[in-house]
Image: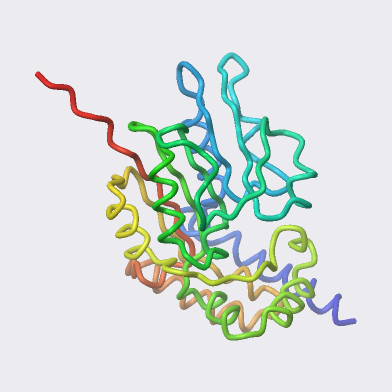
Amino acid sequence: MLRRFIRANVAACDWIESFLPAAFTRSLQALHERTTAALINRPGGAVVVDVGGGHLCPFAARRDPALEVRILALDILESQLRANRVVDWKVVGDACRTLPLKDDSVDVVVSRSVLEHLPDTAAFMSEAARVIRPGGSGIHIFPARYAPFALINRALPDRLSRAVLHFFFPEWKAECGFPAHYDRCTWAEMEALARRQGLEIAEGHRKYYQSIYFKFFLPLYVLSLAYDLALWTADVRPLASQILLVVRKPAPRRSA
């Protein structure tokens, strides 16, 4: 009976969602995948590091077969990497420690929903800047620390948070539920970290629609939706729910 109640609430919320502005509900994950494809399919090929690569690499299928694009998946869990069949290399490693790569050795560093799980994003950004070649890029998408779902996630013990998430959204079980820290996961702090490492901000996008987490109960969804729409209208950057950041390592200037 509870499952039927939840499904009915989700259906009602989906109906409301169909009337919302496309610019408000747009998928930054889809934009991340398209932008990553554009960055990696460069003349001469590219070496790409997929940080937190885990068991899949959604942008691997977007590689231009005419180009030599090689992907290295790095993850702290060997069990996750073992199932990944679409990358060229796999490395077990901690993204907050020294990456097993030479200076200026890769063209693109990619992460998706990974930074919130790192206890030290400053260490990661420093290492990412070290291994990216001049002219190379980093592209990162992550939930922001002051979104309501992130505040709830941090307030609850990890086991309870994971159990609640998987109960209401069993389809997310393989992707969500890992311990999250949200260290410096805000627009201003992440931008400052990148600039401190000498990286330029090439592109940035913010999303405010996070009410999908509350679709299990229509009244809660409606209240959350009103909050999200107000933030989106005013573009209150510190309270964005999701951020997509593209950074670039400047190439050396040619002398005249």
Q: Position of residue 136 (x, y in %)?
A: 39, 34
Q: Residue at x 43, y 43 (%)?
A: 138
Q: Nearer the viewer, residue 83 or 163?
A: 83
Which residue is at the far left? 256
Which residue is at the far right? 1
Q: Position of residue 220 (x, y in %)?
A: 61, 83
Q: Position of residue 66 (x, y in %)?
A: 59, 14
Viewport quadrant of the C terminus: top left
Q: Residue at x 62, y 51 (%)?
A: 93
State whether residue 253 is above or below residue 21.
above
Q: Nearer the viewer, residue 82 or 191?
A: 82
Viewport quadrant of the N terminus: bottom right
Q: Position of 248 compared to 164: left or right? A: left
Q: Position of 5 compared to 217: left or right? A: right
Which residue is at the far top? 66
Quarter occupied by residue 13: bottom right
Q: Residue at x 73, y 67 (%)?
A: 11
State whether residue 176 is above or below residue 217.
above
Q: Position of 239 compared to 113: left or right? A: left
Q: Residue at x 74, y 62 (%)?
A: 172
Q: Nearer the viewer, residue 3 or 18?
A: 3
Identify the colour scheme used: rainbow
Q: Position of residue 28 (x, y in %)?
A: 51, 51
Q: How many marks?
A: 0
